[in-house]
Image (tube, grey):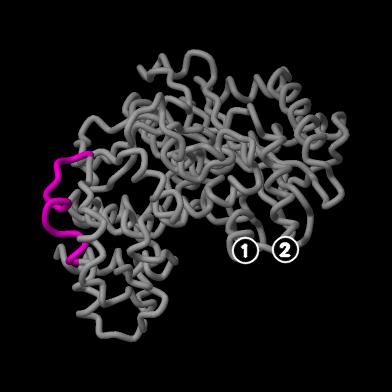
Amino acid sequence: MHTDMQSVSRTRHKSARSSAISHKTTGPSAAAPAGSVEREPRTARQEGRAGALGINAKLRAPDGSAMARRVERFALQSIARDILPDSRTAKCLRIRAHDKDVEVWKSKEHGTASYGGLQTCGSVWTCPVCAAKIAERRRLEIQDAMAQHRAQGGEVHLLTLTTPHTRFDVLEALLERQSKALQAFLRDKSVKKVFKEMGHQGQIRAWEGTHGRKATNNGWHPHFHFLQFVLVKGDAAQLMDWKTRLYLRWDAYCQKAGLGSPSFAHGIDLQDGQQATNYVSKWGLEDEMTKAHIKKGKVGGETPFDLLRAVLADKEDKQAFALFAEFARCFKGKRQLSWSNGLKARFNQAEKEDQELAAEIEDSAELLGQILPDQWRDVLKVKARATVLELATSAGWPAVQKFLAFLDGCRDGVYEYDEAMVAEARLLILEGMT
């Protein structure tokens, strides 16, 4: 006889609910080999379903934890999918690659789980999941280059260039004018002379943008960071001299490009490695270059992913929705990080595209198991991609199998799905595995 889960009281004792999960996920299905969850005959699954899953468990990882950040990234990616339904990001980590089964891998080094066998978009601009992975790989590249350069007696400067902007600026036009000003600035003889005095060996450019709608309401704020690999470590007076001379040329080209005149206080900044490290607090220079566009913005300023957070918190925030769409359109195809010619070769760095990095599986990762196509459809239906990874990270593949068996029951009508029930299923499985 089919059990109507809606008619069962959700106030039953937790042991009764635990019994329902245990009955569902023990026996043949729990012992199934990696890559499958065997199905009991429907009549057998319908027996003994006396307890429904309650709604009391909140089931959130501690704020700031790696798992909490991962859960948020998957949630933000879903928001990006709503905003950009025809983009590669909308399909990222949802569509199987070449009809493969979905794989779950676990890093031996970090202990975290990740997916394989799925398409990835490789977008640092619009995909919170890919951006985090790519940023970490790029951070390690920059960290290695900086270490080599400093070991050879070199120094690293952080040069930041920005321009005036208002809420009336159209982002696409603003970016075009900035690019024009920057190209002219870098070709300028006076600028090249300053760089020569620094012993300039090459640079890495990062491009990012924030929006000030919650602060001074000054619109989009795209700007450039340059990590400069130099041979001369200037003192405070020398840095100020270089900064002043560079500012004069930057100001001239900004005005020529129709951007107005940037102030000396805000239009340019030049700091040596130690000062810059202090400036970015606990971050190193490599973090500032690779992760600034994905972290939470400073007070009043929102990064693109902050705009996604705003929509996640309030689906009626149409402004954040529109701003993210504008950002995605204008930054599409642009490189977030650009190394000057020959710099990667100087430090024996391999050339890898963002897409390659997003799809990479760690060398130290081990395959825990595979999720079959119908199981993966269940996971997508209940928005449980992050939950599967959390279970794999915390309790291994047996916990994932139990969860997939529970979702199988939802599909076949044994349980009637709602988010609270899936959340408590996760909690009870974790409790049962520890």
Q: Which residue position holds label 2?
A: 215
Q: Is residue 393 above or below residue 12?
A: above
Residue 191, image x, y percentages: 68, 24
Please name the residue shown 40% across and 24% down the image.
Answer: 98
* Secondary structure character of the magenta stretch overall: loop
Is 187 left or right of 370, judged from the image as shown? right
Q: Nearer the viewer, residue 299 or 200?
A: 299
- Give the CA separation, mark 1 to mark 2: 8 Å
Q: Quadrant of the N terminus?
A: bottom left
Could you tell which of marks 1 and 2 lies nearer the N-terminus? 2
Residue 323, image x, y percentages: 72, 49
Q: Is any part of residue 412 visible from this angle?
A: yes
Please name the residue shown 40% across and 66% down the image.
Answer: 416
Is 39 left or right of 388, judged from the image as shown? left
Picture quadrant of residue 171: top right
- Amino acid, disc 1: Val
Q: Do tag 1 and tag 2 residues touch (Cβ < 8 Å)?
A: yes
Q: Which residue position holds label 1?
A: 299
